[in-house]
Amino acid sequence: MRSAICTGVTLLALAGCTTRPDDAYEPNDDPAQATVLELGAAIQARANQGNPDYFAVVAEAGTRLRLELRDLGLEDCPAFTLIDPAGAVLFKDGRARCRRIGAPEVHDPRVSFEIEAGVAYRFALPVETSGVHVLRIDEGSNADNIAPYSWDYEILALAGR
């Protein structure tokens, strides 16, 4: 799937939209196709509106899993869903648009979620059962966006005692 962006109404009228390509990790649009993260190795990716990104990380019981997503540019309107090895949702944003207003739809009290506005999003949680944790990223929108939003980010997974 490809995403388009227009820089303004004039550009839209004169030349149409330019295309923002997907990142090299596509297709990673569902848990079965999730991009596997290697602990300690950051990767750079792009989330395009309407095209969710899934990442998987294996963590051992008794460790503390940390996921950090650093903003590398563009619209920065992500919504997150974090799933444990048993398939339980530990965190899920409860919004459909770009602004973070109100509480998440699901927020397990064991999960720490921090926002450093315009810089990073951070998750931390104790791993109780060894296995694959999955993070879903959905790029949001604004009420007036002309074309789908995109967000460039770096994602890093760490696990330690």
Image (spheres, grey):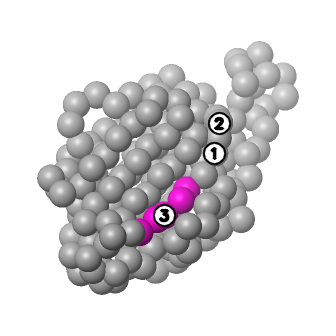
Q: Nearer the viewer, residue 69 or 66?
A: 66
The residue under the point 64% across, 41% down is 72
The residue to which callout 2 is attached is 73
Q: Amino acid at mark 1?
A: Asp
Mark yes or no: residue 135 visible: yes
Quadrant of res 31: bottom left
Left or right of 66 in this view: 74:
right
Q: Earlier in the sequence, mark 2 or mark 1?
A: 2
Segment tinted magenta in the rendering: 155-159
Distance CA(mark 3)–CA(mark 2): 20 Å
Give the number of the mark in front: 3 or 2: 3
The tag earlier along the polypeptide, 1 or 3, is 1
Q: Is residue 21 left or right of residue 127?
A: right
Placement of 142 over or under 110, stated as above or below: above
Mark 3 touches mark 2? (CB < 8 Å): no
Query: Of the numbered discs in the image, which one, if any, rests on residue 152?
Result: 1
